Amino acid sequence: MKILITAGPTYERIDPVRFIGNFSTGKMGFALAQACAERNFDVVLIAGVVHLQIQHTNIERIDVESAEQMYDAVMEHFPDCDAAIFCAAVADFTPETVYSQKVKRNNNELIIKLKPTKDIAAAAGIIKRKNQILVGFALETNDEETNAISKMQRKNLDMIVLNSLNDSGAGFGYDTNKVTIIKKDADKISLPLLSKKNVAEKIIEEIICFQKSL
Ligand code: C5P
């Protein structure tokens, strides 16, 4: 199995020294890449700006910065893959224009106009072949399951991994996570608080199971 994984945050440049980012560290995506590699999958890991290292002969790592670059890398590699896990916290908006010089401070307010980025998972959902498996993540703060299910349907995903910022020990920066895996057929698996490595193992088991049913 050849699998594509997106991980970490994207940085959207404002000027040469500033950006819009988010608190994702990439730990969940890297745990998935490691676990897949250990199962002998070929992994294409497309990483935003993270401070993590990973070394495995089965992993091809591609570092990107912006949502646009992540989109281009996914579109290039996804057609050759059997599955993709979209674990990255992709910026939803990016500055419409990037200042070529550092913006100087003055007493006026600064208004930065943002335009929407491309939805990478949804774009893969459009070009996906019948035998390709797509897994997304949903980080929700309210109406968690309803939002996650509608996201899965809207982006044409086969599975969505829901995590909530309301659970302590789960989410950005932690080594643990508490997730519910929701499948296309509405079957759902609620897992306890586990290490990200163990969460990764469970997600991979579900992907393998799903692939057998195709
Ligand atoms: O719509 P929302 O951002 O909550 O969806 C989350 C899922 O979609 C995650 O799997 C995330 O990696 C993916 N996503 C993406 N490209 C975007 C926004 C989200 O691939 N521009």
Image (cartoon, rainbow, N blue to C red):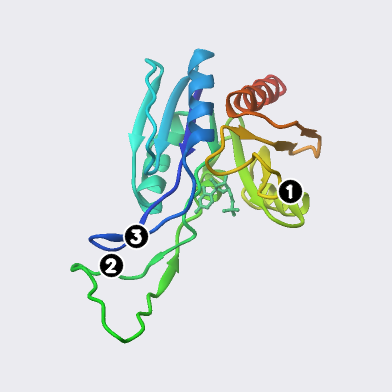
Left or right of residue 209: residue 69: left
Left or right of residue 124: residue 47: left
Earlier residue among tags 2 and 1: 2
3 vs 2, front mark:
3
Q: Amino acid at mark 3?
A: Phe
The residue where tag 3 is placed is 19
Compared with 193, 89 (above or below) is below
Of all residues shown, which one is farthest toward the bottom?
108
- How many residues crowd around disc 3 within 10 Å: few (fewer than 14), some, or many (20 or more)? some
Q: Amino acid at mark 1?
A: Ile
Q: CA distance from mark 2 to mark 1?
A: 35 Å
Q: Amino acid at mark 2?
A: Val
Which label is found at residue 98?
A: 2
Confirm or deny contact between disc 3 and disc 1 (CB under 8 A): no
2 vs 1, front mark:
2
The residue where tag 1 is placed is 149
Task: Determine whether the residue tagged by mark 3 lies in a helix, strand or loop.
Answer: strand
Q: Quadrant of the C terminus?
A: top right
